[in-house]
Amino acid sequence: MSTFIGKYELKADAKGRVFIPSTYRRLLPDTHREQVVMRKDAENACLIIYPVPVWNAKLEEFKSKLDEWDPVDQLLLMQFVSEAEWLDIDSQGRVLITKKHLQAIEIENSEVLFVGMIDRFAVWSKAKYEQSSLSAADFAALLKEKMTKK
């Protein structure tokens, strides 16, 4: 599978429909170009959109780390899965993001920012993404730290 990279600015229409960038749509597996999975990020004010095979792999990895008989693990799994939604991709390449989700990520003026995350991509409010992004110096320092760890 190819990688989702870059940033793309788009606008959601009055109904909450937004085009998935054509670059990203082309990267979806041929057999999974009609649906994706979306969930609100646990820490950031953004939505994460997964191609179906990536979502399934993440779920399997997540499940493998849980004890199915532990009540806390059961609740964690239920909450993680129950907060996910299937999104249908229409014939024009759009998905419908509910008002509830657009409000949760603080979309203003219908401005939506798609941000590549290698095997998935995020949907942000442009303003919120810019507020959350690291400064160039902080980014460089953290990148160096992560890349030089042994």
Image (tube, helix red, strand yellow):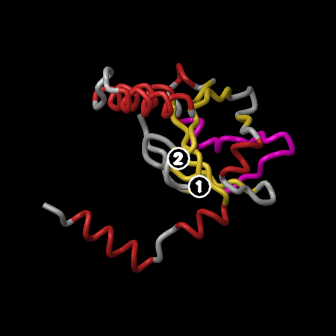
Estimate the x, y position of residue 74 in percent, counting from the top left.
Answer: 40, 26
| Foreground residue among 76 and 137 | 76
Residue at figure coordinates x 58%, y 43% from the top left:
23
Residue at figure coordinates x 61%, y 30% from the top left:
85
Residue at figure coordinates x 49%, y 53% from the top left:
43
- Between the C-alphas of marks 2 and 1, the distance is 7 Å
**Residue at disc 1, secondary structure:** loop
Give above or below for 7 relative to 67: below
Question: Residue 13 in magenta?
Answer: yes
Asked which quadrant contains residue 18, the reply is top right
> In screen coordinates, is 7 left or right of 80?
right
| Foreground residue among 26 and 48 | 48
Asked which quadrant contains residue 107, the reply is bottom right
Residue type marked 1? Ala
Estimate the x, y position of residue 125 in percent, counting from the top left.
Answer: 67, 58
> In screen coordinates, is 98 left or right of 31?
right
Question: Residue 25 in magenta?
Answer: yes
Give above or below for 32 relative to 98: above
Q: Residues within 10 Å of mark 2 (few under 14, many from 20)?
A: some
Q: Which mark is residue 84?
A: none
Estimate the x, y position of residue 118 in percent, counting from the top left.
Answer: 43, 46
- Span highlighted in magenta in the image: 9-26
Which residue matches tag 2? 41
Which residue matches tag 1? 45
Farthest bottom residue? 137
Are the residues at dot 2 and dot 1 in contact (C-beta closer than 8 Å)?
yes
Residue type marked 2? Asp
Q: Quadrant of the N terminus?
A: top left
Farthest left residue? 150
